[in-house]
C-alpha cells in the first residue's frame, strides 16, 4: 500500500512543507529548510512515480495543485522584494502570464472538465529558475535581472502551452 502511494505521500509532504513556509519569516533558516525540502520533494516524487511505475492521474493533479500552492506561497513571501525591485514592464509580463494560465485552466475546466497543465520542458525550466528566485532576494540588482529572465521564460512557457492545446484542438 505504501509503495503504491509513495509518490503521492511525498507530494502531500510537499504541501505540508509549503504550509510551514507560510509561518516562517521570509528568507530565514526555517523558511529555507521548508523551501528546499518542498522544492526537492517536487523532483523526487515524479522520479519515484516513474521509476516504480506508479504514475497516476490523481498524482499528476496532486502534483499540479502542490506546485501551484508552493509557487503561490513563495511569491507571497517574497512579495516585498518584488514590489521594491521589479520595474513596471516585468509586472505586465507577470500579470499577463498569470492571465494566460488562468484562461487556459478555465478553458480546460469548461471544455474538458480537467485542469490543463502540461509538464513541458519550458514549464520545468520555469519551475527550476523560479525555485532559485528567493536565493536572489538579498542582492537587489541581481534579483531584478534574474526576475526579468524568469518572467520572460514563464510567459514563453505559458504561450507554448496555449500553442500545444490549440494545435491539439485543430487536429480533432
Image (tube, rainbow, N blue to C red):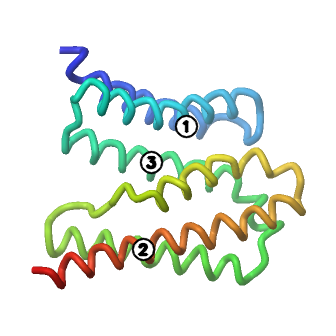
Return the disc, 2 or 3, that comes first in the chain's sequence.
3
Q: Which residue is mark 2?
A: 160
Q: Nearer the viewer, mark 2 or mark 3?
A: 2
Q: Position of residue 130 (x, y in %)?
A: 62, 54
Q: Residue at x 31, y 42 (%)?
A: 62
Up the image or down, 100 lies above or below 139; here it is below
Return the disc, 1 or 2, that comes first in the chain's sequence.
1
Q: Residue at x 73, y 42 (%)?
A: 26
Up the image or down, 46 lies above or below 92; here it is above
CA neighbours of label 3 inside 10 A, class few (<14), some (14 to 19), many (20+):
many
Q: Residue at x 27, y 48 (%)?
A: 61
Q: CA distance from mark 2 to mark 3?
A: 19 Å
Q: Which residue is mark 1?
A: 39
**Are circles 1 and 2 on residues that touch, CB within 8 Å?**
no
Name the quarter where the C terminus is drawn: bottom left
Query: Which residue is outermost to the left?
Result: 172
Please indicate, yes or no, whether residue 135 appears anywhere in the rendered image.
yes
Instruction: Identify the secondary structure beneath mark 1.
Output: helix
Horizontal side, residue 100 vs residue 9: left or right: right
Q: Nearer the viewer, mark 1 or mark 2?
A: 2
Q: Which residue is mark 3?
A: 67
Is residue 111 or residue 81 the one in the foreground?
111
Amino acid at each position: 500500500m505504501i509503495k503504491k502511494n509513495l509518490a503521492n505521500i511525498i507530494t502531500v509532504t510537499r504541501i505540508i512543507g509549503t504550509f510551514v513556509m507560510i509561518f516562517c519569516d521570509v528568507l530565514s533558516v526555517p523558511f529555507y529548510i521548508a523551501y528546499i525540502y518542498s522544492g526537492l520533494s517536487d523532483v523526487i516524487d515524479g522520479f519515484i512515480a516513474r521509476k516504480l511505475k506508479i504514475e497516476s492521474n490523481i498524482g499528476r493533479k496532486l502534483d499540479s495543485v502542490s506546485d501551484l500552492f508552493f509557487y503561490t506561497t513563495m511569491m507571497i513571501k517574497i512579495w516585498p522584494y518584488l514590489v521594491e525591485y521589479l520595474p513596471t514592464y516585468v509586472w505586465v509580463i507577470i500579470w499577463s502570464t498569470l492571465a494566460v494560465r488562468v484562461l487556459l485552466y478555465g478553458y480546460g475546466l469548461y471544455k474538458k472538465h480537467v485542469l490543463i497543465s502540461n509538464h513541458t520542458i519550458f514549464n520545468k525550466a520555469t519551475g527550476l529558475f523560479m525555485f532559485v528566485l528567493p536565493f536572489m532576494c538579498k542582492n537587489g540588482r541581481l534579483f531584478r535581472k534574474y526576475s526579468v529572465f524568469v518572467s520572460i521564460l514563464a510567459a514563453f512557457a505559458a504561450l507554448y502551452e496555449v500553442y500545444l492545446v490549440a494545435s491539439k484542438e485543430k487536429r480533432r
